[in-house]
Structure formats: C-alpha cells, structure tokens
Image (cartoon, grey):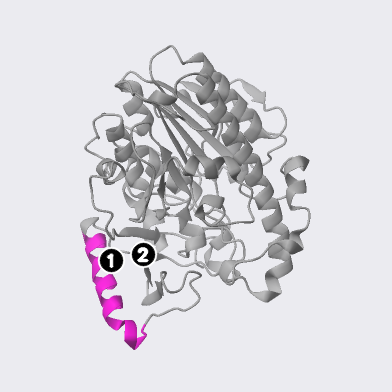
C-alpha cells in the first residue's frame, strides 16, 4: 500500500487521524512485536516518525484545545476535561477554511464543555452548536462517548443519527466517502477522531478480539507490578483488539487515498491525544508524567519529504503551526507552539529539544483522593524531570532506564543534571508566565467547578 507520488500541487489536502488514549509503546513501528499494526507499520516506513511526540497535558480536552489553538493549557484555559474552549485567535479549522479549504470533522469532539450544574454525562449528550465548531463545515460529531457499539452523532443541522456497528469503522467509512467526494474540488482538511482504544477495553469487534484471545500470552512491561499482572493482561488484550481494528481502518483509508488519485497531493497524519498507563507503575489511565501517559505515536506522510525518525521532542501546541507551514499558510499571532516544518524537511538539526509537561489540576481517575497532584516538568529526548508543588519529584534517564524504574531525584551522581533540568524548567515557566500555583487557584481563576470529589477538602 505504498503511497507513490511524483508531484505535489500548491495546496495539499490534509487528513488528520486522531485516536484516543493510544500510547506510543503500543504500535509495531515503535518496537512492540505483540500488537497487530501492519498497516501503520508499513506507512511508518514511508513517513516521518516522531519518536518523542509528547502530550504535554496528557488528557483529552486539554490536548484537543492545544491542537486547535496552538496554545498551552493555561493560555486557552482548558486544563480539565469538559470545560469549554473559547479561543482567543484563529483556530486550526478556521485557518484552513479561511485559506479556501473544505473542512470536515468526523467523530469525537470533546471541546464543547457544559454549563455549571450540568453533570458530565448529561453535558456530553448535547450537540455542539454551530458557532462552537471552530471552522469545520462538514460535521458528523458526538461531543464524547465510549459506547462504541451504540454510538450516535449529530450532523450539520444537529439532527441525531446512529453509527452502524463499531463506530470507528463506520466513521472511517464516512471519511472514505468524504475523500471520494472531494477529489476534484478545492483542497480539503479532514479530521477523523476515533474514541478507541480508550476504555472500555473489551468492546472491539470479535474478529479483532480473537487475535488476542489468550491474554496470558501477553508480555507486560517490566514496570507493571506482579500483583496486577493478570488484570493488566486482560485489559491489554482488549486494548490491543481496539488497536487492531483501528489499524484495519488505517489500511482502508490508505486504499481510498490511492484509488482516488490524491496521494501526490495529500499530507496524512496519524497520532493520539495521550497514552494509557495500563498498570505500569501500578497506575491507570492518563494525566501522569510517566512515558506511558505522555508519549504518543505520531507519523506524518508527506508527498515531498523523505521518511525518517526524529528524536527531538515535539509538544501538542507545536502541531498547529507546523501543519500550517507545511501547507504554506500563515501562523496566527496567538499561537505559542513552535513551527517544526523545517525540522520535518531535514533542514534543522535534530537536537535535544525541551518540552513542558504539566498537570495544573488533577481530576477524575487521578483526583486528589486517588493520589493526584499538580506538577510541572520537562521531557527531553533523554531525560524526564518533574516537580510537584513541594519539591523535585521525578528524574529519569530514559536512555539508560527505558521503563523509568529508577527515580534519580536527589541522586548525587545526577545532581548536575537535575540542576540543569531544574533551570530549564524554571526558564520555560517564566517564559510562559506560569507561577505554578495549586489547582484551586486555576479553577477559581477560570470560574470552573470541580466535578465530583476532584478538589481538595
């Protein structure tokens, strides 16, 4: 399924595929021999692969808000799920639409938020008003659901429909039809947002669940505690089944791109909003600063750029300006992320960049009652360094300690490294005017309510 091409027109199409909660460690092209991702692995061989793509605030709504604005969470204000994004400046969809692109969004949105006093579950059921669609015209969207086999969506007129069967497959078919319908028209920006492999883990179609019917055969990461082994194997088997289903969808999309004759003029991106701990370090879900939570798979196929692997960490706000420049579009003044188009083109050194990782206000699965804490940190291509509100918390040499088993904070041998990283973190925070206050400060500043018992008592 090679995307062979010889030429590129001035304005390339862009197809952006976003999975939910798919960690970097669970694709074949990142070294996992157990997971079934043949289509992604083949595509990765022809693509630019970001080895250290970082979800700087690793949870759903904050990632999506940073992607759409090119800003950090404490600028756009969505540092907590289900809070409304009210952008100050042009969004990603608006930039493409205003440049003459047809724009389309299919799948999960998770940026609408809801009014005070409305429960999360109720708020997620309401359609997204037209004025909050951030530049996307074609619209087949649900705010947020993980009931993958009984999933509904709303169209441009907010009429409700039901996806047929497993929603990711149905959404992919809708994306294929959109591509076919737009091959002879203006360039298009198509965003396809899947709900899997986010939990529940055991709801993929049977044909994909059967690929991992023996969970006990799954080799776990060494940082999963022994007492959690059986539970981890069961859940990871279901997680891998979702992944296999999504990899099948990627294969179908690539076929459509080929058959439609647009490969020579299309940029294709595959990534995820954040990872999943899946019992590494005894933890579950996201928000945490460990690599299973913050690192995501990221490949970009470009008809004019050579395939290669890039080590420099790239953060969520960097995606918008990079995509815009790859399409020769202007970057809005409000964007805070860095433009890495020259890096992707091989014209910039693949040095040791520094990305911020943060949790301004922990919530839900990692609320204060469950051990959550505020943190700020930096992730370089080699090191992870994190402070909480009280002191340095984590330091890992990821080159020597892939599974982050040895916390080097206050280790005399690494004192100079810790000092250097602490200085880097302080510089990054100062540049963003981030005072690193407690979560209650930011919740009050943005006039948010804690959902459930997330806040400190």
The answer to if 418 sits in the magenta stretch is yes
Tag 1, which secondary structure? helix
Residue 162: tell me if it is visible.
Answer: yes
For residue 335, above or below residue 13: below
Q: Which residue is mark 1?
A: 425
**What residue is drawn where x is 46% and y is 51%?**
80
Point out the image quarter for the N terminus: top right
Q: Identify the image quadrant of residue 434.
A: bottom left
Q: Nearer the viewer, residue 300 or 223?
A: 300
For residue 300, above or below residue 175: below
Query: Of all residues shown, which one is farthest toward the top?
Result: 184
Q: Nearer the viewer, residue 89 or 415?
A: 415
Magenta portion: prevailing SS class:
helix
**What residue is drawn where x is 24% and y is 34%?**
332
**What residue is drawn where x is 70% and y is 75%?**
227
Counting every numbered tag in the picture gives 2
Q: Identify the image quadrant of residue 400.
A: bottom left
Q: Which mark is residue 376?
A: 2
The answer to if 382 sits in the magenta stretch is no
Q: Position of residue 30 (x, y in %)?
A: 50, 54
Residue range corresponding to the magenta coloring? 410-430
Residue 144: tell me if it is visible.
Answer: no
**What residue is drawn where x is 26% and y is 80%?**
416
């Amino acid at each position: 399924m090679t995307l062979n091409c010889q030429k590129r027109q001035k304005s390339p199409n862009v197809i952006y595929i976003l999975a939910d909660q798919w960690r970097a460690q669970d694709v074949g092209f990142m070294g996992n021999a157990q997971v079934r991702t043949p289509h992604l692995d083949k595509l990765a061989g022809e693509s630019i692969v970001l080895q250290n793509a970082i979800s700087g605030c690793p949870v759903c709504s904050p990632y999506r808000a940073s992607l759409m604005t090119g800003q950090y969470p404490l600028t756009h204000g969505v540092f907590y799920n289900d809070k409304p994004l009210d952008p100050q400046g042009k969004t990603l969809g608006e930039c493409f639409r205003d440049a003459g692109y047809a724009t389309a969004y299919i799948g999960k949105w998770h940026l609408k938020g809801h009014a005070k006093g409305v429960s999360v579950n109720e708020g997620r059921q309401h359609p997204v008003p037209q004025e909050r669609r951030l530049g996307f015209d074609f619209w087949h969207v649900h705010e947020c659901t993980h009931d993958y086999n009984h999933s509904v969506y709303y169209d441009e007129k907010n009429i409700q429909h039901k996806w047929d069967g497993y929603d990711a497959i149905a959404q992919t078919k809708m994306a294929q039809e959109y591509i076919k319908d737009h091959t002879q028209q203006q360039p298009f920006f198509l965003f396809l947002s899947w709900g899997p492999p986010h939990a529940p883990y055991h709801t993929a179609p049977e044909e994909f669940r059967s690929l991992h019917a023996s969970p006990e055969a799954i080799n776990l990461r060494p940082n999963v505690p022994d007492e959690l082994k059986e539970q981890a194997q069961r859940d990871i088997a279901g997680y891998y089944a979702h992944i296999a289903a999504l990899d099948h969808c990627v294969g179908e999309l690539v076929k459509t791109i080929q058959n439609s004759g647009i490969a020579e003029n299309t940029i294709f991106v595959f990534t995820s909003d954040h990872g999943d701990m899946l019992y590494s370090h005894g933890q579950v879900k996201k928000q945490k600063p460990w690599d299973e939570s913050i690192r995501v798979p990221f490949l970009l196929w470009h008809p004019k750029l050579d395939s290669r692997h890039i080590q420099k960490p790239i953060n969520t706000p960097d995606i918008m300006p990079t995509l815009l420049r790859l399409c020769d579009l202007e970057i809005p003044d409000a964007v805070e992320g860095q433009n890495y188009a020259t890096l992707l083109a091989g014209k910039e050194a693949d040095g040791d960049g520094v990305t911020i990782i943060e949790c301004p206000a922990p919530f839900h699965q990692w609320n204060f009652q469950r051990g959550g804490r505020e943190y700020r940190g930096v992730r370089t291509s080699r090191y992870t360094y994190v402070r909480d509100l009280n002191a340095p918390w984590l330091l890992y040499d990821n080159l020597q300690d892939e599974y982050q088993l040895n916390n080097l904070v206050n280790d005399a041998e690494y004192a100079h490294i810790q000092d250097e990283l602490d200085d880097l973190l302080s510089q990054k925070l100062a540049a963003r005017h981030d005072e690193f206050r407690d979560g209650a400060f930011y919740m009050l500043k943005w006039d948010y309510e804690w959902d459930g018992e997330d806040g400190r008592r």
